[in-house]
Amino acid sequence: MKFFADLHVHSHFSRATSKNMDIEHLHAWAQLKGLTVTGTGDCTHPGWLEEISARLEPDDNGLYKLKKEYLGFAHNFVPHLLVKPVRFIVTGEISTIYKKNGQTRKIHHVVLLPTIEDAVNLSGRLEKNRQYTFRRQTYFRT
């Protein structure tokens, strides 16, 4: 099965990101871009987890879909011929920052999770380890 996806996105909670990066805009822009699947982004941010939990519901195929009451924006924003189903997968980015040979190195890990509940658990585990990781100069951020 072929599909087009964007798995590295950010929400309006991320630095230097548009305030319009809410789930409704992600849904609409995915349709305009011809995407079938898009990531939620920022899956360890508590505020974003709250928003996606309220606006998304599980789909039969293991992904998430926008709840019907939130589809209105896309129907007004997307030309009728481009309207099609978009599914979401829970994603986030974890940045690992460290020093090697006197230089700062950054690795960005895109993380895909099966459920919103798994994102909540991951967020809690990262928060619990935050003090330890800061001492070693490895930072986790959303």
Image (tube, rainbow, N blue to C red):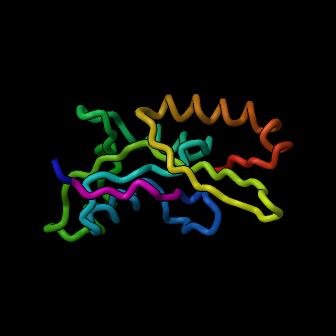
**What residue is rendered at 49% in x and 51% in y?**
41
The answer to whether residue 106 is above or below residue 66 is below
The answer to whether residue 18 is above or below residue 113 is below
Magenta span contains residue 5: yes
**What residue is rendered at 78% in x and 57% in y?**
99
- What secondary structure is the stretch in magenta mostly built from? loop
Image coordinates of residue 130 in percent, x first then y, are 76, 38
Q: Does residue 73 appear left or right of residue 104 in this picture? A: left
Using the image as rendered, state which of residue 13 and residue 129 is in the foreground: 129
The answer to whether residue 132 is above or below residue 104 is above
**What residue is rendered at 78% in x and 40% in y?**
133
Image coordinates of residue 93 in percent, x first then y, are 56, 51
Image coordinates of residue 3 in percent, x first then y, are 22, 54
Residue situated furthest right in the rendering = 135
**What residue is rendered at 52% in x and 48% in y?**
92
Using the image as rendered, state which of residue 39 and residue 73 is in the foreground: 39
- All told, the count of numbered labels is 0
Using the image as rendered, state which of residue 41 and residue 49 is in the foreground: 41
Image coordinates of residue 65 in percent, x first then y, are 31, 43
Part of the protein shown in magenta = 3-10
Q: Does residue 32 appear left or right of residue 6 in this picture? A: left
Q: Quadrant of residue 19?
A: bottom right
Using the image as rendered, state which of residue 80 and residue 58 is in the foreground: 58
Residue situated furthest front in the rendering = 101
Magenta span contains residue 104: no
Q: Does residue 26 appear left or right of residue 19 in this picture? A: left
